[in-house]
């Protein structure tokens, strides 16, 4: 466990010692801030219209602001995660330290979990920026905090499974750009697979749609903890890390 934490800290240090972390945070802050502003503006506009029409029923902050913001943040993650994982192993290969890493007395599983956990913490730090926006709602309103926590738990699960896939892809090349593009292509594909049900209703279409990571996040955005969605994300994380382990074994054998 100590080796995992040491590798995790090293990975986090490498993020924050370069412009990567700060650039991603600034990019995310602008995009997430815009979505929060747009959702809040729509909520205020609808509230004013409702009052002018003589309706006294209060509007739900969670449904009108928090849920749309969380759904949009889950889509933004599809673009951010490739930039987080593209350097995880590709940079080690490029700099020539990969051989030292795979021949060190540290087990492959410890290396993989340490790097994946570092990337996940990096992603959680980025998500924290959107959480600061939502905290404003608690200063001026009374949103339900439980669906909010469930939503962010879902974002971490979704991010974890895509980070696992990105970590695997990063072991297959020494070029960070190729690793980033490959991860982005997979993330985007996994995000839009549920579109197939718009023009197909057969069994095959339902199976393909089930593999969409965004579709499984929707219950979390509503504050619903569904076991099947948690199992889906955990299975995807295991699958991605399993592929990474097999790739690491191949690299160790070649070394």
Image (cartoon, rainbow, N blue to C red):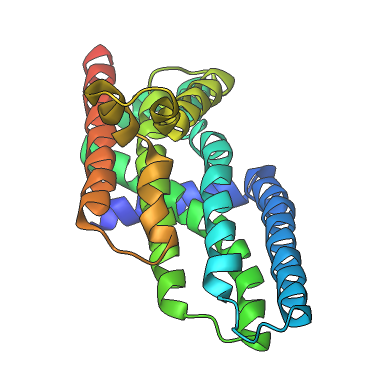
Percent x, y of residue 185: 50, 23
Nearer to us in this view, 69 or 79: 69
Horizontal placement of 213 versus 52: left or right? Answer: left
Q: Nearer the viewer, residue 63 or 178?
A: 63
Instruction: Name the quadrant of the C terminus.
Output: top left
x and y percent of residue 198 in the render?
A: 44, 29
Check the picture and name the quadrant holding the N terminus. bottom left
Tell me where residue 206 sits by quadrant: top left
Tell me which residue sits at (62%, 49%) in the image: 21
Relative to the observer, which residue lies in front, 140 or 18?
Answer: 140
The quadrant in which residue 177 appears is top right
Q: Residue at the location (54% across, 26% down)?
A: 180
Q: Residue at x 24, y 47 (%)?
A: 234
Determine which quarter of the picture holds residue 129.
Answer: bottom right
Judged left or right of residue 204, residue 76 is right
**Position of 133 compared to 210: left or right?**
right
Q: Is residue 77 left or right of residue 162?
A: right
Residue lying farthest to the front in this orientation: 53
Instruction: Please name the residue shown 53% across and 58% down the image.
Output: 70
Q: Is residue 21 visible?
A: yes
The x, y position of residue 166, in whole percent, is 42, 32
Rendered position, 166 above or below 249: below
């Amino acid at each position: 466990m100590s080796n995992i934490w040491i590798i995790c800290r090293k990975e986090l240090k490498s993020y924050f010692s370069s412009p990567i972390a700060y650039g991603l945070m600034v990019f995310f802050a602008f995009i997430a801030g815009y979505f929060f502003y747009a959702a809040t503006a729509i909520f205020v506009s609808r509230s004013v219209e409702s009052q002018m029409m003589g309706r006294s029923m209060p509007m739900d902050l969670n449904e009108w602001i928090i849920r749309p913001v969380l759904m949009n943040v889950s889509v933004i993650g599809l673009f951010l995660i490739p930039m987080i994982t593209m350097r995880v192993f590709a940079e080690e290969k490029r700099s020539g330290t990969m051989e030292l890493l795979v021949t060190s007395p540290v087990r492959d599983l410890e290396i993989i979990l340490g790097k994946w956990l570092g990337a996940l913490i990096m992603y959680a730090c980025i998500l924290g920026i959107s959480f600061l926006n939502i905290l404003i709602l608690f200063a001026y309103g009374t949103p339900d905090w439980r669906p909010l926590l469930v939503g962010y738990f879902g974002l971490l699960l979704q991010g974890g499974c895509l980070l696992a896939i990105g970590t695997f892809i990063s072991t297959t090349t020494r070029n960070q750009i190729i690793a980033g593009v490959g991860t982005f292509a997979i993330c985007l594909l996994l995000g839009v697979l549920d579109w197939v049900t718009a023009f197909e209703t057969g069994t095959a279409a339902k199976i393909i749609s089930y593999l969409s990571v965004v579709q499984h996040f929707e219950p979390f955005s509503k504050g619903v903890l569904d076991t099947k969605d948690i199992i889906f994300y955990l299975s995807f994380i295991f699958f991605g890390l399993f592929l990474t382990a097999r790739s690491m074994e191949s690299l160790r054998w070649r070394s």
